[in-house]
Image: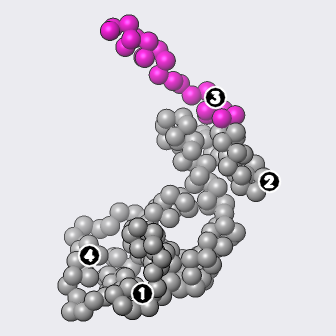
Amino acid sequence: MKRGLFVLDNLLGTPAPPPPPNVPPLEQTRRNADRFLTMRESMEIHREKPLCASCHARMDSIGLALENFNALGKYRNTDNEKPIDTAGQLITGEKFTNVVELARILTTSRKKDFYRCATEKLLTYATGRGVEYYDAPTIEKIMEQLERDGGRTRTLLYSIVASAPFQMRRGDGDRLMTDLQKD
């Protein structure tokens, strides 16, 4: 489920592994059905394969919680003329009945996952390289600051800019000057 995968990867920093080879796409499951299926029904059929079930257990409930919103973000109550069921349970055990309850879980018991993911992604962007093992103390320090300041974006930005990985990064200055001199 694309929405659940997006949340796992981009908000919680816990991406699912890539699908195994020869797994039919979800759209094919919906097309091959003898009736119109809701997204939840399609996912249940897809998860019947043990290889699929292991990964989908992590992401489907998150994606299904967002199912009230169509591809353009418009709110809807039905899928193929059937009521949408947004209830689910995270793999960590927290239960929810709708997207509001899921958001509450993600902003309370799972907020450290979000802080870590946001810090790592912004640090990657700011330094122009991936996060390395030696960045761990910086990430922990920034997460502590976020926790103290209630997760303020300003705290995240200032902490990244003040961090050693950002301050000590190697830029493209020398290469850029060499390229300019050639022209």
Q: Main secondary structure of the magenta part?
A: helix
Q: Nearer the viewer, mark 2 or mark 1?
A: 1
* Label 4 or label 2, whichever comes before in sequence order: 4
| Residue 153 as seen in the image, left or right of residue 21 | right
Q: Which residues are magenta?
A: 161-183
Residue bearing the label numbered 3 = 167
- Left or right of 53: which side holds 111? right
Amino acid type for the residue under numbered disc 1: Thr
Q: Looking at numbered disc 4 in the image, what kind of residue is underneath it?
A: Glu
The reply to whether dot 3 and dot 1 touch (C-beta < 8 Å) is: no
Q: Quadrant of residue 19?
A: bottom left
Q: Which mark is residue 148?
A: 2
Q: Disc 4 versus disc 1: distance between alpha carbons?
A: 18 Å
Q: Amino acid at mark 2?
A: Arg
Q: Say which residue label 1 marks.
A: 78
Q: Residue at x 43, y 17 (%)?
A: 176
Say which label, 2 or 3, has the lower sequence index: 2
Dot 3 or dot 1: first in sequence order is: 1
Could you say whether the residue bearing mark 2 is in a helix, strand or loop?
helix
> Residue 3, position in %: x, y?
44, 68
| SS under mark 1 | strand
Mark 4 or 3, which is nearer the eye?
4
